[in-house]
Amino acid sequence: MTQYRTIALALAAVVGLGGFVAGAEPANPIIGNWEGSFSTDEESLEATAKIIGWGDHYELRLTVDEYTVSLNGERLGEMAAFRGIEGPEEQEHILTAEILDGELTGRVAGPEISADFSLERVFHRPDNLGAEPPEGAVVLFDGSDTDQWVRHPEQWPVVGGAMQVSGSNLMTREEFGDHRMHVEFRPAYMPEARGQGRGNSGVYVHGRYEVQVLDSFGEGIDHSYNGGIYGLRAPDENVSLPPGEWQTYDITFRAPRFDDDGEKVENARITVVHNGTVIHDDYELPEATPGGLTMEEGEEGPIWLQDHGGDPVRFRNIWVERL
C-alpha cells in the first residue's frame, strides 16, 4: 500500500505545461486573490485579500498579520468601492477601499491606527496545470472530442479545448482498478447562487466515490465543498481558486480487494492532490458517496463526471494511468 501513497504524494511535485495554456480566464476583474502591502507611520506589513461575488454585492476579506476584516462593496462602472467598520463603538475604525485600473487601494482611519494599503490581483496557477500524460496512459479527453465517454457525451459541447457539463452525467467507456488520474476543471462563476448551487459538479472514482467540484473560493472546510469526498470527509485544507480559473485534481486510487469467493476483504483507498496540495492522504473509503452508480462494487469501475442541474462547469486534460 505504501507504493500507492508514494506515487500519490509525488504528484504534488509534477510540473508540465504540455499543449494547454496555463492561464486563467477571470470571471470578472474584481473577484479573486490580491496581494500587496499595509503601511502605517511605523511599519509596512504584507497584506492579502480575497474578493468574492455574492449576488448584488462583493465581499472583500483583508488579512494583515493573521488578522482579517471584511468589507462589503459594489461595482460602479469600471471601478468597485468598499466600506467597513471595525471595533467597538468608542474605538470604531472606518475602512474604505476601491479598485481602479486593476489596483486595490484603501485606508484605515480611527483612534488606534491610521494606515494605507495597496494590492494587486494575483493568479495562483497550479504547477501541474497542463501536465502531460505518461507513456501508456489512457487519455480520456485531450481537448478534441468526447469519444472516450458514454451516456450522451454529445450533450457536452467542446468549447475552447474543454468540455462543458450539459444535460447528462458522463461515464468512461473503460473501467479501471488501481490507477492515478489527472483532471483539470473550472467551476462556473454563479454569484447569484449559494452553497451547492455555485458551479457544482463532481468526479466519481470507480463510479462510486465523489470528489466534489464546487466554487468554494473563500469558503471554509467541509465535505460538501470543493475537494471534499462528499458525505464522508472534508479536505484537510481549502485550496480552491476563484471561479473562472483552472484547477487540478491528481487522484491516486487503490481499488477494493476481494477474496476467492467474491467477498470484499479491503475497502478502497484514495489520495487527492488539489492544486498541488495533498488534501486526502491514503483515506480509506468505508462506503459509496451519494449520487453515483448503484451497480455492485467490483475490482474495476468507470470514471463518472456529474451533471448537477446543468451548472456550466468545464473539464479538460483528463488522463488515467493504470497501476
Image (tube, rainbow, N blue to C red):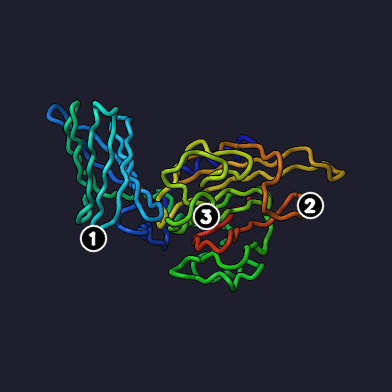
Name the kind of residue labelled 1 in the image.
Glu
Q: Mark 3 sits on what residue?
A: 197
- Marks 1 and 2 sit apart, C-alpha to C-alpha, by 55 Å
x, y (%) of residue 293? 71, 55
Position of 159 with respect to 56 (left or right) is right
Name the kind of residue labelled 2 in the image.
Glu
Query: In the current view of this chain or complex, which residue is farthest to the front?
Result: 89
Q: Mark 1 sits on what residue?
A: 78
Label count reads: 3
Question: Can residue 122 be seen in the rendering of this structure?
Answer: yes
Residue placed most toward the observer, 5 or 100: 100
Secondary element at tag 2? loop
Secondary element at tag 1? loop
Query: In the current view of this chain or complex, which residue is farthest to the right?
Result: 261
x, y (%) of residue 299? 74, 49
Tell which tag, 1 or 2, sits nearer the viewer.
1
- Residue at (25%, 58%) from the top-left corner? 76
> Quarter of the image holding residue 83?
top left
Q: Is residue 257 above or below residue 65?
A: below
Q: Mark 2 sits on what residue?
A: 296
Mark 3 vs mark 2: which is more N-terminal? 3
Position of 168 with respect to 314 (left or right) is right
Residue placed most toward the observer, 310 or 226: 310
Name the kind of residue labelled 3 in the image.
Gly
Crowding near the residue tagged with mark 3, few <14, some 14–19, many ≥20 C-alpha atoms within 10 Å: some
Mark 1 vs mark 3: which is more N-terminal? 1
Crowding near the residue tagged with mark 2, few <14, some 14–19, many ≥20 C-alpha atoms within 10 Å: few
Tell which tag, 3 or 2, sits nearer the viewer.
3
